[in-house]
Amino acid sequence: MSIQSIIKGTGSYLPSKILTNADLEKMVDTSDEWIVQRTGIKQRHIVSEGETTSTLAIEAAKQALDASGLEASEIDGVIVATTTPDLTFPSVAVHVQAALGLPSKMAFDVQAVCTGFVYALSTAHSFLQTGMAKNILVIGAESMSTLLNWDDRTTCVLFGDGAGAVVLGESHDTSRGILSTHLYADGTHKDILCTTGGVSKTQTAGTIQMQGRDMFKQAVTLMHNVVEEALSTNGLTDADLDWLVPHQANIRIISATADKLGLSMDKVVVTVADHGNTSAASIPLALDQAVRDGRIQDNQLILLEALGGGLTWGAALLRF
Ligand code: ACO
């Protein structure tokens, strides 16, 4: 009997502290008008003292587990997509496993920057397909604010913190589930978006630096290509899509992708104005918001897509 991977529950969590564009105007030479016009971002949530990526991940995971109706004992894996772990090791995933009292089965982090959640979901899907697990918590969690140079106006206005989670579980209902995933990376572009340091090079975490224009150009083309590939692989077209849930980096990239697909913006889940770019957390945060407010319904066709540092990019097409 064929195994399907379905999303059994979603959850998300945002730290309570909000940093608005007006707050940033007091910190660097920028304006609300510039930020909104170029990115669509109005505010972002930021971790406070005592909050870390794992505290955000744990709250999102609790919600997803609750929504799935499963017991903690039924979860046989945790995969966390993050670029901002609490510690170099152990992983955020083992923090989540311990906090939720999950069984002593696999728990690990995946690092593919903003594409991390799509990579993690695809990895979990593969474990389910091969029968190695029945239910996996897949989480995207980030504290991007801790990687920012707060004197660099070209990056500090863009990012935010948060976490989103899903329980991906086995099902034998062939009408639903993940239809396909598509993962890519091109390390020749590794310098377009990177940190200034890292454990083995500088013994620090470094801060984010980005060639914004190059990133923008790559994003529009590569996201369009991967989205078309996901649809054509399954013999579907843009018209079949109910919702596009894109990585939330910039409203202009999101609109350009929707435009190229001929998709109206009211079929696109957009959270970038309120969350900023939360890297690997942005897709599961947007997904959970649209599930909880009733926009995303069972059996709808949903396309997730992302691009980030590496470069990495990817998509997942699923019948919710
Ligand atoms: N406030 C005011 N002015 C600014 C700011 C700011 N915060 N930042 C830059 N500027 C200035 C620049 O200095 C420049 O001034 P100049 O013309 O006098 O030299 C001017 O604004 C234009 O700068 P650009 O960088 O050319 O602006 P652009 O229109 O490209 O917008 C942006 C910049 C928003 C970063 C855009 O390039 C972008 O969104 N890029 C893609 C980012 C992205 O996709 N990231 C996804 C991956 S993120 C991840 O993986 C973690």
Image (cartoon, rainbow, N blue to C red):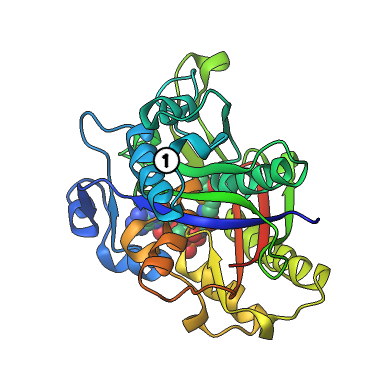
**Residue 34 point in image, percent of width and height:** 33, 65
**Residue 23 point in image, percent of width and height:** 18, 52
Q: Residues within 10 Å of mark 1 (few under 14, many from 20)?
A: many
**Residue 107 point in image, percent of width and height:** 56, 28
The C terminus: image quadrant: bottom right
The residue lying toward the viewer, choosing from 77 and 121, is 77
The residue lying toward the viewer, choosing from 189 and 64, is 64
For residue 275, say whether it is visible: yes
Left or right: 273 with respect to 173?
A: left
- Which residue is depicted at the point 58% across and 76% down? 300
- Which residue is depicted at the point 42% across and 40% down? 142
Residue wearing tag 1 = 142
Left or right: 228 with respect to 63?
A: right
Q: Is residue 89 above or below residue 275?
A: above
- Which residue is depicted at the point 48% across and 73% down? 296
- Which residue is depicted at the point 35% across and 72% down? 293
Three-letter code for the amino acid on which mark 1 is drawn: Glu
Left or right: 113 with respect to 291?
A: right
The residue lying toward the viewer, choosing from 252 and 107, is 107
**Residue 187 point in image, percent of width and height:** 73, 39
Label 1 residue SS: strand
Q: Is residue 217 above or below residue 211?
A: below
Q: Quadrant of residue 318?
A: bottom right
Q: Quadrant of residue 188?
A: top right
Q: Quadrant of residue 1?
A: bottom right
